Image (cartoon, rainbow, N blue to C red):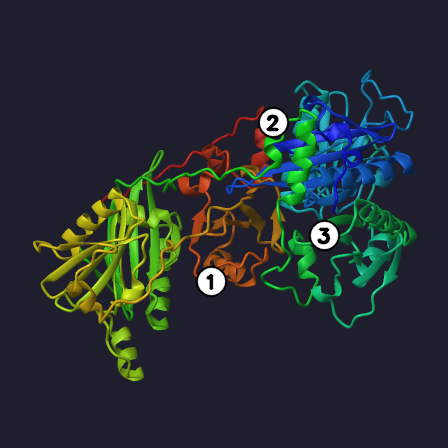
Amino acid sequence: MAVSMRDLDPAFQGAGQKAGIEIWRIENFRPVPVSKSAHGKFFTGDSYVVLKTIALKSGALRHDIHYWVGKDTSQDEAGAAAIKTVELDAALGGRAVQYREIQGRETEKFLSYFKPCIIPQEGGVSSGFKHVEAEEHITRLFVCKGKHVVQVKEVPFARSSLSHDDIFILDTKSKFFQFNGSNSSIQERAKALEVVQYIKDTYHDGKCEIAAIEDGKLMADADTGEFWGFFGGFAPLPRKTANDEDKAADAVSTSLFRVDKGQAEPVGADSLTKELLDTKRCYLLDCGLEVFVWMGRSTSLDERKSASGAAEELVRGLNRPKSHIIRVIEGFETVMFRSKFVSWPQADDVAVSEDGRGKVAALLKRQGVNVKGLLKAAPAKEEPQPHIDCTGNLQVWRINGQEKILLPASDQSKFYSGDCYIFQYSYPGEDKEEYLIGTWFGKQSVEEDRASAISQASKMVESLKFLPVQARIYEGNEPIQFFSIFQSFIVFKGGLSDGYKKHIAETELPDITYTEDGLALFRVQGSGPENMQAIQVEPVASSLNSSYCYILHSGSTVFTWSGNLTTSEDQELVERQLDLIKPNLQSKTQKEGAESEQFWDLFGGKSEYPSQKIGRDAESESHLFSCTFVTEIYNFNQDDLMTEDIYILDCRSDIFIWVGQQVDSKTRIHALTIGEKFIERDFLLEKLSREAPIYIIAEGSEPPFFTRFFTWDSTKSAMHGNSFQRKLAIVKNGGTPILEVRILLLCFL
């Protein structure tokens, strides 16, 4: 898409250069920046453009753009916001996802930027309304909907507004009443209390009493009587059903439209495939609650604006105000959009260059704008940290059928690829001893041993009251915590278990189990003496790699080989591992390109080998999911973890399953299966490895390598009660958690 100077509104110059939120209000059809102090304050008569910028670990910047339309804004102002959103995307290089947000129908992603909620105020610049000034307090009634983010809407102060399905907040001059509908969940009630706290701090200077009213419980307490007194006394509430608008949006079947001269024309197809989308055109994908605008990379800015207008017309014409409009650019489609298609190629063939972004940067630079953030930044080079105390006590067992054999300390870092192991690591925590119990599956291990390892490790965790972190780890996908605990880790080929030997005998495969006097080649890797590994590989020249050092031995003959891309630190690790594999033997040092004939003879001759390092995925953006319908929680924090639920923290390279204290034991024992199913279904289409490490974490025993993804307060998980009761105690206590006192009775025989 060609970008010219006229496409760039002066208000957008320099936008999106660093992580954070930027907001513009539409005034006289032009965007005007909103100060940070006013972020989260929206007026019903206005329209806004909101830019969310995320800095990825790779150094790149990712953008989401939202335009918010107040219920009293004019159609022209709303249209201007939609057009300015397309222009802002062009200024950022034409790759942002764009969302239309209607007051009261906002997406969870948008609301997550302004936790705990947004409460639009009457008035607005664009509509000609005057902003309502805070004078004498007016009693107001709000309805709250949502388990993860809260949709807050002011409703008429009348009994008819109340229902059994939702949470209501009655804001009086001296007291808040939270009415919990009988059909609402504990989690919804807890989230609504965050809204109570927000209103209390914002409009009452933090000084106001709080009372919780339970629907259907007619106890003669003063708070309940006082609440119903505002509505003329108690009377039963009617049962409400889904309205026609909800049913209409849910009933829409998925349809694809091609935009031609601003008009949406149906595309006839038996099934949706990516091949239906032409890079020179724009399309609408109507999915009922979501209407996607797909913009080909070869389309012009005017064509994209036209397609956006066609989407607005489509939603208005079908009278579906609940529908969200989401605009995506070819090559940067959202997971939700791609999931609507039967066929979507794993590797997108669209050539995405920095050319468009560079042109925009050049235009802005000529205007004297700092354009550093518009160009891809170099990724920060950081050594991964284990975030675990490495001074603890380690025990390791090798699995042999239904038994586990404790390994002596001298052998507990020596694993065989055909076997399975259980390890228990205890280390000092903040205020108590912490435990990590894990299973390690060798690549050639048999299913019987794997099942036995999982079963026995689970019993160990259960015997310790589910307090230890439980880990499932596969050979070749070990996390940094594992290597740091073991420090000098060696993997030998073959196996010692009866299951492995039986498998070899039944399949008539050669037994390749390591022997000290045989021919063996080890690749040495790691970052230092506290994190180094020697992995046995095939003893052939093609197993070499210029980025690594190796140990080769045949009987008493030992060689060390250093690739041209290795460092002195890598070569030091070889010497350390050599002391463990072949102690007391003198090795012959080989440099790449200056090897002896004897060295190559042990391989059976010289051959080609790679020079690039065997890399792992860089740490990517983390995602939190509630296991209830696998719902993603955006911009998550510790308060999103509710004690009644199970959550999945997807870090791509690692999967954490967090189990709340009040999850029942029957569900708790399936936590590992939940993690495996999550990986299998790959909801974010990340091509997750089926062998990614999985950690099971119990509330109250969170390790540092989990809590580092949050701003963590360990006292919150030591509180009494369910999530609503805990949050109510915090709100009533001025934000300070009331800790549970645990008494241990020790019996001495």
66 lies above or below 346: above
Residue 372 as seen in the image, left or right of residue 258:
left
Picture quadrant where residue 32 is located: top right
> Which residue is at a point 67% across and 60% down the rendered structure image?
339
Residue 690 at x, y percent in the picture: 47, 62
Badge 2 vs badge 1, beta-carbon distance below 8 Å: no
- Disc number placed over residue 690 in the picture, else none: 1
Residue located beneath label 2 in the image: 732
> Which residue is at a point 43% across and 61% down the rendered structure image?
691
- Disc number placed over residue 297 in the picture, else none: 3
Tell me the kind of residue under disc 3.
Arg
Picture quadrant where residue 450 is located: bottom left
> Which residue is at a point 38% across and 55% down the rendered structure image?
614
706 lies above or below 492: above
Residue 737 as seen in the image, left or right of residue 200:
left
Of labels 2 and 1, earlier in sequence is: 1
Task: State the separation of the CA atoms marked 2 and 1.
Answer: 46 Å
Q: Of circles 1 and 3, which is in front?
A: 3
